[in-house]
Image (cartoon, grey):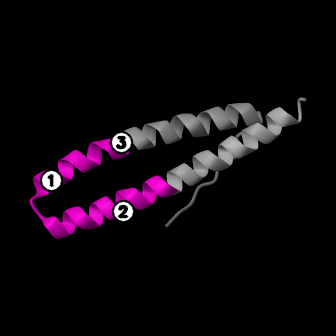
Amino acid sequence: MCLVVLYLDMPRPEAIAQIREAAKNIALQFMKIHPALRELNDEEVMGECIKSVHEMTVHLETIKKKIGKLERSDDSSLL
């Protein structure tokens, strides 16, 4: 596996906005998975996939909470 790290020089508010937009797009894609799983006609696969999508959603929500907390701390420093 090759991991490429790109360092973008962007202000924190722009980075937060980019992460929020990506998280929104990921969540929208997750919503497309669930209805399609029924069409597989395999309860075991469907169950495992639903579990995995749920876990990924939990991780995505963690990212969103951390970003929100960071943003609020930035906003409070302006007061």
The three-letter amino acid code for the residue at tag 2 is: Ser
Residue 51 painted magenta: yes
Q: Is residue 47 above or below residue 16?
A: below
- Left or right for 28, reference 60: left
Identify the residue position indicated by label 3 in the image: 29
Start-end of magenta stretch: 30-58
CA–CA distance between discs 3 and 2? Answer: 14 Å
How many marks are shown on the rendered structure? 3
Mark toward the start of the polypeptide (3 vs 1): 3
Q: Residue 16 location in percent, x, y?
A: 67, 37
- Which element carries disc 3, helix, strand or loop? helix
Q: Which mark is residue 71?
A: none
- Which element carries disc 1, helix, strand or loop? helix
Q: Which mark is residue 52?
A: 2
Q: Which mark is residue 38?
A: 1
For label 2, the crowd category at 10 Å Cα-Cα, with few meaning under 14, some 14 to 19 and many 20 or more, is: few
